[in-house]
Image (tube, helix red, strand yellow):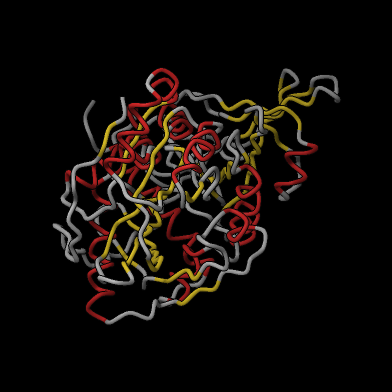
Amino acid sequence: MAVSSKKTVSKTKATAKPAAAAPVKAAKKTASPASAKKSGVEKSGAASCGCCSSHDSHSVCGEEKINLGVFFGGRSSEHEVSLVSAKTIIDAIDKDKYNVIPVGITKNGNMVYLKDSLDPVKIIKNGVHAIFIAQPDVSHNLWIIDENNKGGIEVINIEIAFPVLHGPFGEDGKVQALFEMAAIPYVGSEVLGSAAAMDKSIMKSLFMSYDLPIVNFVYFTGHDYKHNKKEVINTIKSSLQLPYFVKPANLGSSVGITKVNKITELEAAIKTAGQYDNKIIVEQGHQVREIEVAVMGNFELIAAEPGEVIPAADFYDYNDKYKAGKAKFNIPAKLPEKQLEDIKELALAAYRAVDAKGFARVDMFVDKKTQEIYVNEINTIPGFTSISMFPKMFEASGMTYKQIVEKLIEYAIELFEAKCALKV
């Protein structure tokens, strides 16, 4: 059956107050065993301290540099966007502090690695098989298998993971669980926050529980629609007013989204969304200004100055984001100071509502007629290309791209060390 949201009243204040930012200490380093070769297996990179459960305290190891694994690509329809984001991030990483280990994930889900290459496109195209071992006591957790070179194996130890995987199988908690099993720090939200933010119906339910203002919506599964089509359509028509936005519940980058202006367009829009996910969400359309807020932090949060997206198309779709590039941006958004503060406050409350960590971009609406503010959604691994809003908003707030990337790595270490202090 289709489920409709409760009637939500737009507000301009959140239930939680933003916290002041606090400095985050960089990871300490300890000496690591030297690399060794034996039994045809070549070891490279620093060895791991092991899992946090086996140590009273844990610091990220590395004789001189920390091995930082950047994971990109993936099985999502946002695969190509991930490659662009990863290239920009890799270029910005401080090579004096980190050995960058780029790990591609192909569209069929296999990991690949290409020695001496930092180019995500080349790695996906020409990389050899890589296997990540998600066990905490394995000293070298990335095994590179070159079948063209008599099956030669090289092993590397990834000490920190930086997932740049947009959409399903990367932003939804699955790869985060892999890093949790391996007991290594990783950038971004944990399993729960990632999964909750990925599923728009769950995310909006959490927003409602925090009394955050959202647009009305209906969601249903493909099974519901197939077996109770009339009931689903009637629920949409009785709960919402045209126009509608029909979306896959678990996807991003505006993939699979259709704006429906006439009821005769609804079935085609549902079919399009259903190609990408088995759960579909239909949202009430409004005449709005699209406002975005970049947030960083684990416990004490920083919100950048909000930015406004001015789409060249009817709405900010995939083509406008990544191909045509005709959208315009105002950073900070041209809104009254009080309204900007309310938007930042709501963004921080939305971040807490889904238990986000590390960083996220919160997308908001301001109704053009009523000036009411709505929280639309949160993205826990937002686009990180040179034209993406997340880095642009923090750059406008006084941080360089390199500083943003470094801060995210520091947050990964901070969160990991906090978890290591817990008893299990």
The x, y position of residue 180, in whole percent, is 40, 31
The total number of labels drawn is: 0
Q: Is residue 37 above or below residue 117?
A: above
Q: Residue at x 28, y 32 (%)?
A: 3
Q: Residue at x 28, y 82 (%)?
A: 336
Q: Is residue 222 left or right of residue 75?
A: left
Quarter of the C terminus within the rendering: top left
Quarter of the N terminus within the rendering: top left
Camera-nearest residue between 352 and 407 = 352
Camera-nearest residue between 120 and 211 = 211
Q: Mark yes or no: residue 96 visible.
A: no
The x, y position of residue 126, in whole percent, is 80, 37
The x, y position of residue 363, in whole percent, is 38, 58
Camera-nearest residue between 268 and 150 = 268
Which image quadrant is residue 410 in? bottom left
The residue sitting at the left extreme is 15
Which image quadrant is residue 104 in? top right
Q: Mark yes or no: residue 233 visible.
A: yes
Q: Residue at x 42, y 71 (%)?
A: 307
The x, y position of residue 304, in whole percent, is 36, 69
Which image quadrant is residue 194 in? top left
